[in-house]
Amino acid sequence: MTLAQFLVEAKGKTYASGGEGGEKIKEDGCKELMFEKDNFKYRDRYYGVNPFIGEEVVFKNDKVIWAMNYCGAVISSDVNVKNIYTFLKKAMSQIKEDRPFRGPAEYIDGDYKYTDSSDGDINNFTGTEEISYQGEKVYKLNYHGCSIQK
């Protein structure tokens, strides 16, 4: 299994399927999602709801091999926050191996539109995801990360 394949599966089986309620609450207040398969382990920890900040880390044979930091927020008070995060989970379930950071470059469902633009590859990258509702930007997240040398 490659790192990209693992990330697609891990993200699909954590936040995209159970986030915002499926997390474990740690003693420092962070919310944590975990997934393990073969010799890989994925950990997503974040603080807050709106705004929020977090970190995803992948371990292989108990050594860190990849990490990503992110920070985001709903930026409109005119839209239901729960609806935005429900739509975000749908977009996140569309992740592909060629861009295993967040969701697809574009995803539309009804009045919601998700866009993600990134520079770099799995080894070193930055990006921004946004959600608009009826053409108005309502959510934004920035992220960056890289592979970690062994």
Image: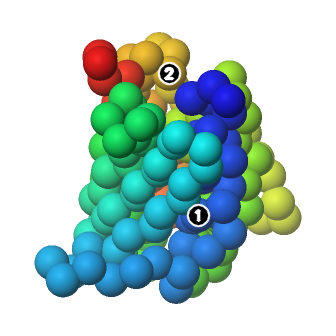
Q: Quadrant of residue 142?
A: top left
**Residue 75 in view in this figure:** no
Could you tell me residue 4's position as x and y percent? 62, 29
Q: Residue furthest left?
A: 28
Observer-nearest of 145 and 111: 145
Residue annotated with mark 2: 122
View extreme (right): residue: 110
Residue 7, horizontal then vertical, whole percent: 59, 40
Please tell me which residue is depicted at 58% across the width and 64% down the height of the picture.
Answer: 14
Decide: few, some or many residues near mark 1? Use Cα within 10 Å; few <14, some 14-19, many ≥20.
many
Q: Between disc 2 and disc 1, whose residue precedes?
A: 1
- Residue type indicated by callout 2: Ile
Position of residue 38 relative to residue 88, above or below, is: above
Residue 147, by quadrant, is: top left
- Disc number for residue 14: 1
Under mark 1, the amino acid is Thr
Is any part of residue 147 visible from this angle? yes
Mark 2: give few (<14), some (14-19) or many (20+) Cα within 10 Å: many
Residue that appears at 68% across and 69% down: 17
Q: Quadrant of the N terminus?
A: top right
83 and 148: which one is in front?
148
